[in-house]
Image (spheres, rainbow, N blue to C red):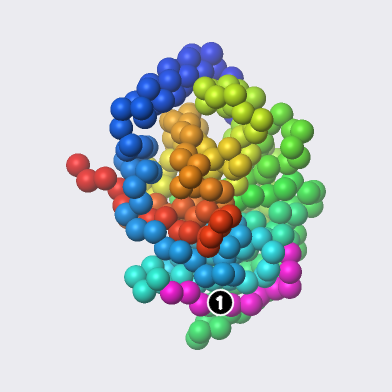
């Protein structure tokens, strides 16, 4: 189990965060791990059905998305800025979606999981046995192809002092006993350098295809936590709340293009595309 508790790590991150806030007064650019998060390369306003978008994944040059009230899978064509809807289930609290090879898994917060496959312009659907027997309030999935593991962010209850990233073994189809990582939300809230009523609550996760860093979004306090492959905190960044109104989805394509979605509050849900900064 890995808990954020190192005093040295706390000090380094606090200094880095302080420098970030100082620097933000000097520049409008927000450079985080090679991405300018203040200036999307492209922004796509999503269709009405995705106003409450809650999950993203990338597969075969398309972005696939779900929203948290309907059993609908949306296939988003990034170049044409168009989308296609597939119905796969009745209403439910769908919070995460992830592609594993050519299969798409859609999961509710309580662990009800659907195995989806796009075949000849239609979707083949199979409801699986629940991955999680206990209600863990799941909020995101990320597949690690090297380890054949599916990471799942568990928000738990609002009263929980820690949040966990769980490991599901795709070969044995079982949940591992020890979590991949444990987030101490009080330490993270202090490290952010701000006083907030909100604790760090994971809403989406993704693994960078090249660096293998784990990106973890949190809402409603709009933060991005990045862990390196050694499970050390690389950065904890407050996001621009006017841009990322309610970040609920994150994924990468094969070359490292970053996609982040946000729910629509005073307008449509949006998909932000960030190309890596060259050089």
Query: Residue sitting at 67 percent across and 70 percent down?
Result: 71
What residue is drawn where x is 58% and y is 55%? 265
Regarding residue 268, the answer to whether it shows in the image is: yes
**Is 278 placed left or right of 56 in the picture?**
left
Q: Position of residue 21 (x, y in %)?
A: 41, 25
Label 1 SS: strand
Magenta segment range?
82-92
- Percent from the top left, x then y, of residue 103? 54, 68
Q: Quadrant of the C terminus?
A: top left
Q: Nearer the viewer, residue 136 or 170?
A: 136
Instruction: Residue under label 1, please give it.
Output: 85
On the question of residue 59 being in view, the answer is no
Q: In this picture, is 5 found above or below 34?
A: above
The image quadrant of residue 111 is: bottom right
Residue 221 x %, y %: 58, 37
Task: Name the residue at 59% across, 24% down.
Answer: 195
Magenta stretch: dominant secondary structure: strand
In magenta segment, residue 90: yes
205 or 3, which is in the foreground? 205
Q: Is 212 left or right of 225, judged from the image as shown? A: left
In the drawing, does residue 30 fall left or right of residue 170? left
Query: How would you rate the neighbour count of disc 1 (Cα within 10 Å): few for under 14, some for 14-19, many for 20 or more?
Result: some
- Give the residue displayed 56% in from the left and 56% down from the top: 266
């Amino acid at each position: 189990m890995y808990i954020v508790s190192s005093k040295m790590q706390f000090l380094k991150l606090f200094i880095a965060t302080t420098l970030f806030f100082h620097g933000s007064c000097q520049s409008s650019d927000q450079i985080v791990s090679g991405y300018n998060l203040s200036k999307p390369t492209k922004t796509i306003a999503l269709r009405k059905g995705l106003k409450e978008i809650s999950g993203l994944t990338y597969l075969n040059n398309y972005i696939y998305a779900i929203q948290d009230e309907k059993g609908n899978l949306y296939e988003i064509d990034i170049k044409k800025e168009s989308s296609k809807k597939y119905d796969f289930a009745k209403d439910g609290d769908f919070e995460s979606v992830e592609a594993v090879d050519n299969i798409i898994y859609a999961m509710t917060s309580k662990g009800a999981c659907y195995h989806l496959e796009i075949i000849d312009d239609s979707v083949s659907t199979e409801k699986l046995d629940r991955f999680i027997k206990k209600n863990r309030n799941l909020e995101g999935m990320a597949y690690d192809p090297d380890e054949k593991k599916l990471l799942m962010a568990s928000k738990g209850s609002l009263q929980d002092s820690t949040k966990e990233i769980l490991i599901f073994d795709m070969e044995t189809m079982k949940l591992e006993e020890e979590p991949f990582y444990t987030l101490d939300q009080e330490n993270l809230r202090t490290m952010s350098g701000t006083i907030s009523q909100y604790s760090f609550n994971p809403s989406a996760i993704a693994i960078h295809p090249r660096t293998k860093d784990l990106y973890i979004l949190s809402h409603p306090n709009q933060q991005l936590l990045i862990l390196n492959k050694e499970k050390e905190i690389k950065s904890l960044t407050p996001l621009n709340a006017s841009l990322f109104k309610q970040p609920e989805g994150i994924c990468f394509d094969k070359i490292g293009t970053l996609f982040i979605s946000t729910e629509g509050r005073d307008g449509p849900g949006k998909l932000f595309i960030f190309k890596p900064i060259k050089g």
